[in-house]
Amino acid sequence: QVQLVESGGGSVQAGRSLKLSCVVSGDYASRCLAWFRQAPGKEREVVASIYTTFDTTYYADSVKGRTTISRDIAKNTVYLQMNSLKSEDTAIYYCAAESRIRTRGACPREGAQYAYWGQGTQVTVGS
């Protein structure tokens, strides 16, 4: 079992930055951890992911270059640093852990591959 608790969401103006945190507990070693988001009326989409064994990362094209996923092993926390925020970044952001233990390969991008989810944190970007 893996438990995840997000924090750090809020309302910011476009162009500003926000850093989301996700405290992870349980058996999350050798799994992918990912941030997803879901905007009103839209499907859930992956924002970024990190494979805990090698710390390899993936970013969606929509956030690439202005977003960084990282983790602090000592704090059991994964972060999502978002810069140059746009109104289209407005969504509920979820932290998730992959269903299975992984030995290699890229992190999945489909939410169905992640069995463990946090409660979500709202990010609202105003113009």
Image: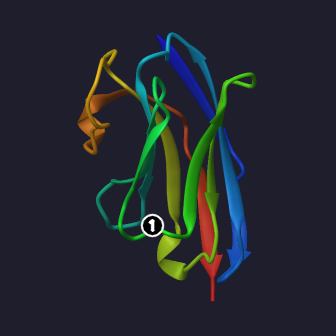
The amino acid sitting under disc 1 is Lys
35, 94: nearer the viewer: 35
The image shows residue 112 at horizontal and vertical percentages of 25, 35
The image shows residue 124 at horizontal and vertical percentages of 61, 70
Q: Is residue 9 visible?
A: no
Residue 96, image quadrant:
top left
Q: Is residue 42 visible?
A: yes
Quarter of the picture holding the C terminus? bottom right
Instruction: Answer with left or right where residue 3 lies relative to residue 36.
Output: right
From this view, report whether residue 76 is shown above or below residue 22.
above
Name the residue at 64% across, 70% down: 83
Residue 66, image quadrant:
bottom right
Please give the residue where the numbered disc 1 appears in the rendered image.
64
43, 27: nearer the viewer: 27
The image shows residue 38 at horizontal and vertical percentages of 41, 57
Secondary structure beneath label 1: loop
Name the residue at 55% across, 62% down: 67
Name the residue at 72% across, 51% down: 8
